[in-house]
Amino acid sequence: MNEESRARVLVVDDSSVNRQLLGRILQNEQYDVILAGNGQEALAAFSAWSPPDIVLLDIVMPEMDGYQLLGMLKADSATRHIPVVMISSLDEIESVIRCIEAGAADYLPRPFNAAVLRARLSASLAEKRMRDIEREYFRQVQILTLAAEELEHGRFDPTRLQPVSARTDSLGNLSRVFERTAMEVRAREDRLRREVRELRIEIDDGRRGQQVASITGTEYFRSLRESAHELRRSLNAVDGPK
Amino acid sequence: MMSAQDTSMLDSQKFAGLVESVGGDLEFVAELAATFFAEAERLIVSLDEGLATGDVDLVRRSAHTIKSTSSSMALVSLAEVAGQLEAEAKSGDLSNGATLAKAISALYPSARAALESKVSEK
């Protein structure tokens, strides 16, 4: 969700009347509404490509009640951060307290009042927006940390830093400096590897030369060479000039 | 024009609040009332089923929903009796359950008439 797009609100209530009423109030408040008549339908909404930004959850429902669904949402790292607002009557305040202690963000009393609904949802959504920004920041810090590890192990891929380097804040600056430094280090390493390769060739050539010299420099080799010359001279004398 | 009986069934101020909450859309409120009638009748049957089979949870949930939706529709008397039945079911003691369920069934026609009368007002 960004500032321009409408927030997506999931309403979970087994009563058609409550879903219809709350759905209309929310639409009038410019929210996109998803309606679920039970816990299973609600969970399916989170598997969709565009999960809800906030959940309005009735407590009393058959099969999977509001407490159970709240518990499942808070236990899952993929849905834990989505605020859940409990729908309740004023005489259910103990149930509401229990839900807030279990991680619900707030409660919405019945009968529904548009102004109260607007205030409660705005507050919860603003908090979610801040948390989303924080989560994204920490995710990008992780990308940078991972890049440092990869650089150490010679596996650094600069394209992975693109989303971080695109930032206009200090983290983005750090990422760009890191990227530049990593590229310089890589270039220096490549240069060093080339120089080492060249040195190795020189050394190998030198070694070979020494090996040859160690053979050809011996008395035995010299006497062999002289014997070969003598033999050639003798053969030439026998064959005559050609 | 609402009768004296109607006024005890339906709280006009709450009804006005309902209409205001949906931006004054009376057509929508009439549709909502139709949904309420269908749901309430189904829930009253569930109440009887729950009482017959001793399913306390079914009685509690059905009474809870009648209470909350009646309250949303400004049907205060129906909501109150449903609330009492919900409280009984929560405590696990349904000795008074049948009486309260009968009271709900008895109130319902008048509640329905009061709501129908109100939504048809211009």
Image (cartoon, coloured by chain):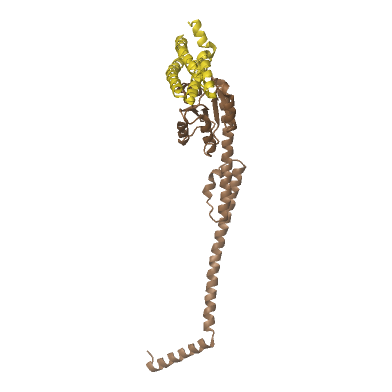
Which quarter of the picture shows residue B87? top right
Instruction: List x then y, in percent, for residue A58.
Output: 51, 26
Left or right: residue B49 versus residue A161 is: left
Please identify the quadrant where the C terminus of chain A is shown.
bottom left
Left or right: residue B41 versus residue A162 is: left
Q: Is residue A97 above or below residue B75?
A: below
Instruction: List x then y, in percent, for residue B52.
Output: 44, 22
Of residues A212 and A7, the one drawn nearer to the viewer in this rendering = A7
Which quarter of the picture shows residue A139? top right
Q: Is residue A201 above or below residue B70?
A: below
Chain B image colour: yellow
Q: Is residue A233 above or below residue A69?
A: below
Would residue A224 be seen by someone viewing this image from the given angle? yes
Q: Which chain is brown?
A: A
Instruction: List x then y, in percent, for residue A199.
Output: 55, 68
Q: Is residue A200 above or below residue A48?
A: below
